[in-house]
Image (cartoon, rainbow, N blue to C red):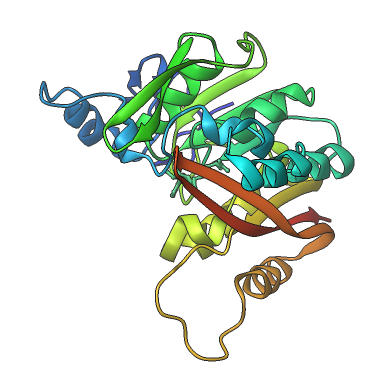
Amino acid sequence: MFICPRTRGPLSGLYSERAHFTYPTVDGVPILLPDPRSLVDRLQDPGQTFPDLTRLSVPDAVTPHLPPSMLGAPSGLGQWFTQLGEETPEAVVVSFGSRHAPPGPALDLGCGVGVLARRMVASGRMTWAMDIRADAVVTAKRLLTGQMNVALIPTHRQGTRRVKVPFKPILTDLAFCVGDATLPPFAPESFSWVDMGDVLDTYGESAPEAMVEATALVQHGGVLTVATGYGSLGAAGEGSPGPDEELLEAMTALGLVLVDQRDRVPWVSRDYDRSWRIRFSHCMAFRKN
Ligand SMILES: C[S@@+](CC[C@H](N)C(=O)[O-])C[C@H]1O[C@@H](n2cnc3c(N)ncnc32)[C@H](O)[C@@H]1O
């Protein structure tokens, strides 16, 4: 399934004949970056904690997987979260993928701790989970495949609580790799469904390049799902378009057709016992005709 991110040629196992190079692995995860050695050298530094969750933009590995109703918020906030039930941006994009993508493999691009990948497999698809951060992919793999049964979630500054991982291990139909969305280690049209998560908030300046590459990975008739969490991207000019307008314009320019969308989907994240963030995400599904 994988190709060489340097030459775009085939790999035999993890060996690229054209590049005369064997891609390394970390914790059984292939590092399919154009220059994987610098990452491996960094990981071999005895002073390094690996995987280092503090380097990921999530408070812990487990809570990003939980619906708002399971986050244990106090009083009125908790009641509101309970009313939201299972509604999350991930649940919405998975319903889009299940409804609009033809049968076939799925890719969680920028998988973080594997929230989408877990749901993609549960929806019955062979799934690949890829992120540029080795910490994220190794954590996702350990969490989803049952190697990590217990996780620490923050309670207050420097305080944590141990929680049992609240989902069953996934033993088949799930593969992981470290890769860069702007140089993906997959051949064009490999997937019937690709999810890019909150692309504009995540990929920064490389968002346009990542969108072009992600579109190339989708088969004709397949679906690309994206969302915007309206994260803060620094100062914006007066009257500049909203992120969803920008996304719609970019996707349309790539020849994609909007087939479904849901706006103002509550995206609740828990930092610690007394800190919550609520954003309203705009989730969209695009077809590649
Ligand atoms: C906000 S997280 C989203 C994680 C996950 N998709 C979700 O919805 O929970 C964004 C992820 O994109 C990853 N990322 C950023 N730039 C990337 C790139 N060029 N290639 C692959 N992943 C990238 C980050 O490392 C991070 O884990």
Which percent across, then down, holds residue 273?
45, 37
Determine the residue positioned at 68% across, 35% down: 69
Q: Is residue 43 left or right of residue 32?
A: left
Q: Could you say which is closer to the camera, residue 278 or residue 103?
A: 278
Quadrant housing the C terminus = bottom right
Which of the pair 103/97 is nearer the observer? 97
Residue 161 x %, y %: 40, 21
Q: Residue at x 71, y 23 (%)?
A: 121
Taking the image as shown, residue 71 lies to the left or right of residue 120, namely left
Of all residues, the one furthest to the bottom in this rendering is 238
Residue drawn at the location 49% of the way across and 37% of the way down: 112
Residue 228 visible in image: no
The quarter of the displayed image where residue 60 is located: top left
The residue at the far front in this view is 75
Instruction: Please identify the quarter of the rendering in which residue 86 is found.
Output: top right
Is residue 193 placed above or below 42 in the rendered structure?
Answer: below
Left or right: residue 84 compared with residue 145:
right
Out of 226 and 282, give the one closest to the viewer.
Answer: 282
Residue 93 vertical position relative to residue 124 in the rendered view, above or below? below
- Residue 194 rendering spot, x and y as whole percentages: 67, 43
